[in-house]
Amino acid sequence: MSLTRIHNLSISLDGFATGEPQSKEAPFGHAGERLHEWMFATRFWKKTGGTVGADHAFAERHEPGIGAEIMGANKFGPPGWQDDPDWKGWWGPNPPFHTPTFVLTHRPRPPIEMAGGTTFHFLDASPAEALQAAREAAGGQDVRIGGGATVVRDFVAAGLVDNMHLVQVPIVLGRGVRVWDGLEALEQGYDIEVVSTPSGVTHLTFMRKRG
Ligand SMILES: NC(=O)c1ccc[n+]([C@@H]2O[C@H](COP(=O)([O-])OP(=O)(O)OC[C@H]3O[C@@H](n4cnc5c(N)ncnc54)[C@H](OP(=O)(O)O)[C@@H]3O)[C@@H](O)[C@H]2O)c1
């Protein structure tokens, strides 16, 4: 069965997955790179060298078995990217997705085929409709919800997420976009495992209860 998965979504102690304001110079706003420093230290991120302990073991689960990704407009680019016909995402000519990748936006444009197997498709659709399109493109594999916070929240609220891995970083951002708003009692629908690692972050794994 094709699952809907979230991996490596880094949040502050107060639940923000990004700071503010987002811009081309500061994609995570005042959070800077602080939400992801735990990951930058791992071999998953560095490819050569880097730590191979618990943070790496969690991080590398991001890729196996994924056949498509869904992301929000604000992950794909800074505010206003829709006005730039040449904007193709942050990631250069060979983005790290290597699958069909669906960008939710109220201003869709034709698909963009990139090197390495990534094709960006732009969709103005409900979460359920987007998931159906991604499933069809995923060839029987799982679909990853890649963020940001708004899209994660919407897919979780719609009951579409099977497995969710968040990484709580011990910083307080105070402002930005929070993942938890509107998700009261979310824990009742999931089995949850919590593991803190020596780097100081806490990995939260939510696995949907099967009734
Ligand atoms: N902490 C992490 O691990 C992590 C992971 C990924 C991303 N991020 C960061 O999170 C930030 C982005 O998060 P965000 O919450 O601001 O935004 P987001 O979830 O990336 O995107 C939200 C936007 O997507 C469009 N959208 C969402 N649902 C839609 C639908 N059903 N149909 C059509 N359009 C839809 C809308 O944009 P329009 O109305 O403008 O089209 C909406 O404002 C970025 O800074 C990114 O770098 C963090």
Image: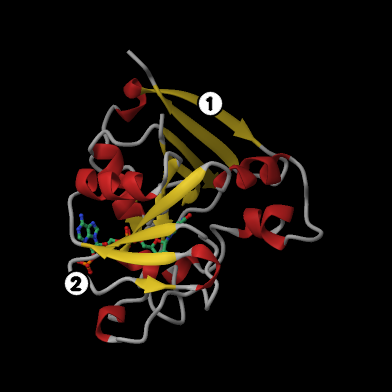
Instruction: Say if 107 sits above or below 4 in the image.
Output: below
Between 178 and 74, the residue placed more toward the observer is 74
* Residue ID at (58%, 43%): 64
**121 sits left or right of 11 in the view:** left
In percent of the image, x 38 and y 69: which residue is there?
76
Mark 1: few, some, or many residues within 10 Å (few <14, many ≥20)?
few
* Residue 183 in the figure: left or right of residue 11: left
Q: Position of residue 171 (x, y in %)?
A: 53, 53
Q: Is mark 2 within 8 Å of ligand 1?
A: yes
**Marks 1 and 2, how far apart at CA:** 38 Å
Q: Earlier in the sequence, mark 1 or mark 2?
A: 2
Which residue is the site of mark 2? Answer: 107
Residue beneath label 1, please?
Answer: 193
Q: Which residue does the image show at 51% across and 35% down from the upper left?
A: 204
**SS at badge 1:** strand
Amino acid tagged 2? Arg
Q: Is residue 46 above or below residue 146?
A: below
The answer to which image quadrant residue 113 occupies is: bottom left
**x%, y% of residue 121?**
32, 64
Task: Specify whether 19 is left or right of 65.
Answer: left
Does residue 202 appear in this view?
yes
